[in-house]
Image (cartoon, helix red, strand yellow):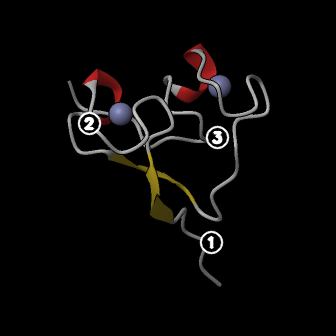
């Protein structure tokens, strides 16, 4: 039995609504833990917990 792997799926960056910004690395989308869920701290507005993407469990960026 192997441990369940964390899976990620793309979600439209809520900070820029897909336009591309600093927080989504100009991609307009971000990888978030599947199934994608709005950040419970800010309800999708963007805060430090969601890396300002609006989504819970964003994949850590390498910057
Ligand atoms: Zn963005
Ligand atoms: Zn948040």
Q: Quick check: is the Cβ at mark 3 less than 8 Å away from ligand 2?
A: yes
> Which is more toward the observer, 15 or 56?
15
How far apart in space, not on screen, are marks 1 and 2 (Cα)?
32 Å
Q: Residues within 10 Å of mark 2 (few under 14, many from 20)?
A: some
> Which is more toward the observer, 59 or 25?
25
Mark 1 against mark 2, which lies toward the viewer? 2
How far apart in space, not on screen, are marks 3 and 2 (Cα)?
19 Å
Q: Are marks 3 and 2 in contact (CB under 8 Å)?
A: no
Q: Position of residue 10 (x, y in %)?
A: 42, 60
Residue 31 against residue 35 in the figure, above or below: above
> Which residue matches tag 3?
56
Of the image marks 1 and 2, the number of the one nearer the N terminus: 1
The residue depicted at 59 percent of the width and 34 percent of the height is 54
Of the image marks 3 and 2, the number of the one nearer the N terminus: 2
**Quadrant in which the C terminus is drawn:** top left
The residue depicted at 23 percent of the width and 33 percent of the height is 25
Q: Are marks 3 and 1 in contact (CB under 8 Å)?
A: no
Residue 36 against residue 53 in the figure, above or below: below
Q: Are marks 1 and 2 in contact (CB under 8 Å)?
A: no
How far apart in space, not on screen, are marks 3 and 1 (Cα)?
19 Å
Ligand 2 image position (quadrant): top right
Residue 35 against residue 1 in the figure, above or below: above
> Which residue matches tag 1?
4
As helix, strand or loop, the secondary structure at mark 2 comes to loop
Left or right relative to 24: residue 42:
right
Q: Quick check: is the Cβ at mark 2 less than 8 Å away from ligand 1?
A: yes
The residue depicted at 62 percent of the width and 21 percent of the height is 49
- The quadrant in which residue 19 appears is top left
- The quadrant in which residue 20 appears is top left
The residue depicted at 64 percent of the width and 25 percent of the height is 45
């Amino acid at each position: 039995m192997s441990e369940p792997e964390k899976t990620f799926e793309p979600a439209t960056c809520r900070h820029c609504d897909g336009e591309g910004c600093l927080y989504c690395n100009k991609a307009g989308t971000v990888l978030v833990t599947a199934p994608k869920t709005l950040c419970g701290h800010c309800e999708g507005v963007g805060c430090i917990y969601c890396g300002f993407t609006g989504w819970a469990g964003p994949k850590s960026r390498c910057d």
